[in-house]
Amino acid sequence: EVVLTQSPGTLSLSPGERVTLSCRASQSVSNNYLAWYQQKLGQAPRLLIYGASNRATGIPDRFSGSGSGTDFTLTISRLEPDDFAVYYCQQYGSSPLVTFGGGTKVELK
Amino acid sequence: EMQLVQSGAEVKKPGESLKISCKGSGYIFTSFWIAWVRQMPGKGLEWMGIIYPGDSDTRYSPSFQGQVTISADKSINTAYLQWSSLKASDTAMYYCVRRGGGLVLDAFDIWGQGTMVAVSS
């Protein structure tokens, strides 16, 4: 099973700041099938990024994904008030088996 | 509009059985895998298993194998998650989600609104 470790656990930031979230896999993610999801309080998760670097439909371009193999990053270029949420990475390269990271909470400083 | 609509919140006692549902609309339900994801209170996301409604091919996470049953009725575009004997530790929010196929390289692109299951004596 591929284990995903997200860091840091929590980030305390202000609007306008640049955000970098990390997701590290215990083994190489096949085909870079790595996705990022955003979950706001009381809501279902929403797909942000798929295939490590592709933005899903309707996702603003301030969100970007990068990385390959075992190290992946989600970047928010300028944090907006609507972006305070928990972010999860997910690998689905060993489909149908899927694993999620433990999440990173981005909170208001 | 493509969507998954889940059944409502449930309050149950330990030992009781339960079946929750997830109805798809706005797309060809039988052509996409449907997964179930658990989120315990204050915790992260856990993948439970997945079903292909077209032929009911089903796979389970090792952590959930034997604990739940996933099924689907393609005639009514609905997937199910069921328990034969609930435990207090089954208390959680449960999401169904579509695996999006080639358009999103198989990421999970459409999520249901979630079904809260509370198990308490």
Image (tube, coloured by chain):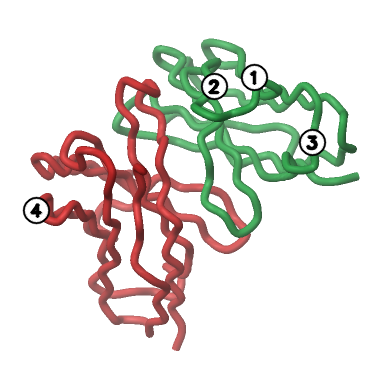
Q: Secondary structure at mark 1?
A: strand
At x 18%, y 43%, the residue is B58
Residue underneath mark 1: A64
Chain of the residue where label 1 is placed in the rendered structure: A
C-alpha gap between disc 4 and disc 3:
44 Å
Q: Secondary structure at mark 4?
A: helix
Pointer 2 and pointer 1 on the same chain = yes
Residue wearing tag 3? A80
- Depicted B35 relative to depicted B109: above or below: below
Q: Is residue B102 left or right of residue A45?
A: left
Q: CA distance from mark 1 to mark 4?
A: 40 Å
Measure the C-alpha gap from mark 1 to mark 3.
14 Å
> In green, which chain?
A
Report whether A62 appears left or right of B121.
Answer: right
Q: Quadrant of residue A48?
A: top right
Of the numbered discs 1 and 3, the one sitting upstream in the chain is 1
Residue type of the residue flagged with mark 4: Ser
Which three-letter amino acid code belongs to the residue tagged 2?
Answer: Arg
Where, by quadrant of the figure, is residue B16 drawn? bottom left
Left or right: residue B81 versus residue A26 is left
Q: Are marks 2 and 1 in contact (CB under 8 Å)?
A: yes
Looking at this view, is B99 or B48 the one in front?
A: B99
Q: Quadrant of residue B28?
A: top left
Residue A71's x, y, as percent?
A: 60, 16
